Amino acid sequence: MTAAVMEPAAMEDTGLRSLLRARKGILLSALALLLVLISLAALSVGATGIPISRAFTILADAATGRSTVGGDALIILQVRLPRLFLGLLVGAALASSGALMQGLFRNPLADPGLVGVSAGAAVAAAATITLGDALLAPFIGALPFGALPAGAFAGGLLTTLGLYLVATRQGRTSIATMLLAGVAFGALSGAVMGLFSYLSDDRQLRDLAFWSLGSLSGATWTKVAAIVPLILPSLLLMPFLARGLNALSLGEAEAFHLGVPVQRVKALAILLVAVAVGASVAAAGMIGFVGIVVPHVLRLLAGPDHRTLLPASTLLGATLLVGADTVARTIAAPAELPIGILTATIGAPFFLWLLLRRQGGMAL
Amino acid sequence: MTIILEARGLSYRRSGRALIEDIDLTIQEGSLTVVLGPNGAGKSTLMRLLCGELAPTAGTVLLNGVPLRNIPAWLLAHKRAVMPQASDLAFPFTATEVTGLGVEGLGRGLSRADRQRLVFESLEQADVAHLARRNYQTLSGGERQRVQFARVLAQLKAGSTVEKRQLLLLDEPIASLDLKHQLAVLATARELVRKGLTVIAVLHDLQLAAGIADDIVLLQDGHLAARGTPDTVLTPTRLAEVFGVILKEDALPPHPWALAMA
């Protein structure tokens, strides 16, 4: 058979994109390098400037067990370092969960924040705080911090499952139903949050405000330690779903024809998203749009293959959130902006742009 | 001749309605069977039962003597491929990447270069090599269907490293194709059958069916209305009965595509 002559305009995959599509290693190395650079900047920049060389010395001293002295050592080790780790974990978790959800729903607009999963997790976390203290405190005293991720996980899991049941019929997810269900879930959790704040005392009220805005400012080693065992395994397991998600983009029946254990892939994806988002929300509140912006940019750069997309989203998500947090705490220093406000300010117009592009008839 | 696929007392009911009712069917290895029937006769349901996508409410399907439900999905993917009716795609994969989904994770002892070669061969075979780097989402319906055909061919090639006795199910494979590519897809299928593949296809065009089928399976209201070679099944009385059309037998050209393959 003869191949038709190709029009130059028909070529859509040239130059940089073609290179990044073919050589997964280049993209991942570049992203890893960026991650390291932004992380160093995040340690150095802030209300008190600390030169990167000094930050290195402090880290090296701490790593070798030598005692460190001085206020800057305290800032690095007890304030900026846990905050950096929290940012890396939460950013990686949100971006990877976004990529995973989009693959699961066969829909590039799915995002844990947008469709109410984060809100569901936040409500459950809020319930754990207000009701948990009231109901359980007489018996076991103050709740350990670990109860929050558990509660948030349960909330995230229920919302994801509910969303999937509502929006997916016969293996096809309706984008309209999904987004509208997200609106409904969001409104419901808004109402429940409102109820909780009505019932709360002053301290609980501050905590609730923290969840609805999203912030890394409360970072402590305790928080980091509580979410590492949840987020790290999720991130490491996600790439194993890549082949299944690739096949799923053809449709559920087609994925089965290709030998993918569809039900198992779907169940595991929902579980991993719920764990990762639940832990993130418990530690840093609701931070939106990371899960939609990061995978989308990466798809534009390197194509939609989940074998590249998932690890790349982990790296870029971590970088983006740490970068955004650094901006959020320096832009109005010594005061700081809740990071959720920053990501929404950038993310919401981006999301609108995606919608406009769709209506323009272009493939998303 | 050996039997590759066998359905015994196959029934499928949904919300009390029988979509497939007590069908017994044997498919010979290396044959091309065409499933015919009016709309709603249960053709697609039968195909979904035969490929293992649906579990029958009664009866069983045996592939090489093994019940389908006992074959894990990954192994089944090496033994049979399915080309769906028109498919959309969730993400902007290129035609090459879509075809590559047919070899991803399948086959034994295939290097990266082997897989790339299989993908390239399949793109050529389905006459879409010139679309290789195009975004699937921007292709026309017919082009998409040919890329899906390439993907299915790639899956069979990769699968043949594990299982030589393979089955290909085509559900209206030519619905959105132009005449040239209709004939090309069917010619490719016919050629694969000559090399030993077993093909079951749902078609609407009686003339094409009569031209390429070894066997015709005629469905009506979920029942097996007739089964046999084209000239025994496609009789004027039966067509009048099943399709409600009057047809002159001598109006069926014996080789309807001799005129078209250039």
Image (tube, rainbow, N blue to C red):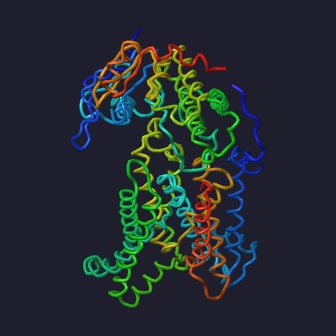
User: Taking B14 as reference, is A123 left or right?
Assistant: right
Q: Quadrant of residue A52?
A: bottom right
Is B8 in front, or is B79? B8
Q: Where is residue A9 shown, x and y percent of the image? A: 76, 47
Residue B31 visible to an observer of this rendering: no
User: Taking B87 as reference, is A353 left or right?
Assistant: right
Q: What's the residue at 55%, 27% (across, down)?
A: B108
Residue B244 visible to an observer of this rendering: yes
Q: Where is residue A320 shown, x and y percent of the image? A: 64, 67
Q: What's the residue at 54%, 57% (across, down)?
A: A108
Q: Where is residue B260 shown, x and y percent of the image? A: 62, 21
Q: Where is residue A344 shown, x and y percent of the image? A: 57, 75
Is A225 in front, or is B218? B218
Is A258 in front, or is B225? B225
State how many labels appear. Answer: 0
The residue furthest top is: B1
The residue furthest bottom is: A202
Q: Quadrant of residue B215?
A: top left
Quarter of the image for the C terminus of chain B: give it: top right
Quarter of the image for the N terminus of chain B: give it: top left
User: Taking A282 as reference, is A288 left or right?
Assistant: right
Q: Is residue B190 above or below residue A297?
A: above
Q: What's the residue at 61%, 84% (across, down)?
A: A336
Is B169 in front, or is A119? B169
Q: Is residue A220 above or below residue B3?
A: below
Q: Is residue A131 above or below residue A358?
A: below
